[in-house]
Image (cartoon, helix red, strand yellow):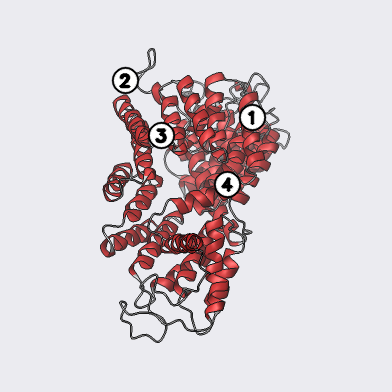
Amino acid sequence: MAPVEGRTESSVFEGWEKWQIALAVGAPVCLGLAGLWYYTKVKKSDQTGDDLSKAKPPSAKEKVKSPDASKVASGSQKENESKDTPLGKAQEFKNIGNKNFKQGKYDEAIKCYTQALEVCPPENKTEISTFYANRAAAYEKLKDPKQVLENCTEAIKLNGKYTKALSRRANAAEQLGELQLSLEDVTAVCILEGFQNQSTLQMADRVLKNLGKSKAKEALKNKKTGMPSKHFMKSYFASFTKDPVQEMFKKNKTEKQEEKESNLPEQSNEEEKILNIPAPGDSGDSSSTSVVNGDPEISKSNFMKAVEKLEAGDYEGVLSLCRKEIDVSPPTHYCQLALLLRGTMFCLTAQSDQAQLDLDQLLSTEQLDKKIKVNALIKRGSLFISKEQQTDGLADFAHAVRLDPKNSDIYHHRGHQNIQLDRLEDAIKDFESSIELNPDFPNSYIQKSYAEHRRAAAEQSTMKLEKAIKSYEDTLKRFPDNADGHALYAQALCDLGRFDDADNEFETAIKLEPDNANTLVHRALLKLQWKHNIEEPVALIKQAIDLDDKCEYAYEILGTIEVQRGDMVNAVNLFEKAIDLCRTENEMSHLFSLLHAAKAQLQAAQTLGIPLPASFSQM
């Protein structure tokens, strides 16, 4: 399959995967700073440079000139002001300070700038602002961020569009851990520079990420618990083929069906050994038959009831039923499974600390059944990675492989985590292992194609993108009714500019899985990139929210679009809704970055007196 005619190797990849959303909504691509907007109409006359960075070479009449100076705004006093006037004396102190600065005598330079401030008439605000900025530059050389911040603040009070002072204060605030102030200042600098300075954009990206991480950690401590959408829950449990809890309800379902067909009364199977779980008081021989301790009816009314809820897709109440099972004294035959299920539900409801406690407790149990142990290691490993504890997470997966190297679930879920970590080659190898062990499981084929797609995009390789396209096509021939396969294939087609074909694939995915709100959001992004019209994409996203009001992705993308419309207030509200719904620290960190990018732009625009522009001319 040849590259799209008229498109260069790199432009083929102007797609809209989550890692490239900024391109779809028209935002500038500046690392992780997807939310920032262009504003290139700031007049140069509105900006004043730092007196220590943009100086013109000294003229014959001015032997000592600021090593960092730019011309002050029109109307200011001239440099050759008589030395007999207060302003002239102030300028002379400044010039001497600049000379000391050039020679690396920063303490002496500070003294001179201080003298300039002491004698300068208060009405000369531009000059006073410059003296403060110069003194801040000297303190910066002495690595004193507190003094840099204080002096830049005074400079900015007198000149709100002083780019160098804003930039220096942003750096100092970052060093002092005042990330919100740093972000507001660096955002203002981005606007004043028209988003053209790469180092400023990199700083903004760094500050946003760090702020997002700190806010996410803080928010998770007080996060209200909530159940994700039923579609998300169903998809999560479907990603395991060797989950001991699901094996339980599959067996339960089979037995019920057999009883129904034989027209026999339902009988209790509480004493049947479904898994090799030694009951409390056993000899520890995992091959022996367990004896149920406690009232079997209690066990059935708690854990088995939770299993029946899972089977029916009714997830509310599962946590409380597991708790009741775990609290039975002495422990029942199903205590370990209840602990595994409760830990899983804690993971899914963004209660990561409680999830880890359950999984840690389970994994410390002696004579733990191998199936339970491997499943718990997969889930704890994924939890560790979501909390940016990569080493611990990968160690859990490696432990699981040593215990049961033929368990395809380990490789499938480690492959998924490797995608999140951008370890794409490792992800592809993991999915290949999963496919080899479980050739009838479509999810691994689809995720392998997706990892190949991600690799092609990262390497800007048309050849590898075509390989990924072929991989999707082969997968869909084998599993034509898999909705995720059609949706991900559509995204790859979009990267090749085959928008009609991509839209058809999305339409197929929606027909196959009409309860998946994410597919509607993806189709909206396609329409946005393809048609460059805002109305239909926004309508699709709102339709997704009506279908599933817990669709975090819909709020995130709609918020990003509102940023491009210039409606920062609505964008902030939408990002906050997405944050309330997200389940992991990584997701929350990303969303907080978007939220604070929007807030910073709103604040900067108000401070600078600049109207918020809209990127969509239709609006």
Q: Which residue is mark 4?
A: 592
* Quadrant in the rendering for residue 495: top left
Residue that lies at the very extreme toward the top in this rendered image: 6
Q: Secondary structure at mark 4?
A: helix
What is the distance, in whole Å, between disc 3 and disc 4 at their CAs? 38 Å
What is the distance, in whole Å, between disc 2 and disc 3 at their CAs? 21 Å
Q: In this rendered view, identify the residue nearer to me: 223 or 219.
A: 223
**Labels 4 and 1: the sequence-earlier one:** 1
* Quadrant in the rendering for residue 425: top left
Q: Nearer the viewer, mark 1 or mark 3?
A: 3
Residue 383: x and y in percent read 44, 58
Q: Which residue is mark 2?
A: 1
Residue 571: x and y in percent read 65, 37
Q: In this rendered view, identify the residue nearer to me: 539 or 256.
A: 256
Would residue 271 be found to the left or right of residue 229 on screen? left
Q: Amino acid at mark 1?
A: Val
Q: Which residue is mark 1?
A: 538
**Labels 4 and 2: the sequence-earlier one:** 2
Does 155 appear above or below 532?
A: below
What is the distance, in whole Å, between disc 4 and disc 2 at their CAs? 40 Å
Q: Nearer the viewer, mark 2 or mark 3?
A: 3
Q: Amino acid at mark 4?
A: Phe
What is the distance, in whole Å, between disc 4 and disc 1 at their CAs? 22 Å
Residue density around tag 1, few if under 14, some if 14–19, many if 20 or more, within 10 Å: many
Would residue 172 be found to the left or right of residue 495 on screen? right
What is the distance, in whole Å, between disc 1 and disc 3 at their CAs? 29 Å
Residue density around tag 2, few if under 14, some if 14–19, many if 20 or more, within 10 Å: few
Q: Nearer the viewer, mark 4 or mark 1?
A: 1
Q: Which mark is residue 480?
A: 3
Residue 16: x and y in percent read 48, 30
- Which residue is depicted at the point 62% across and 34% down? 541
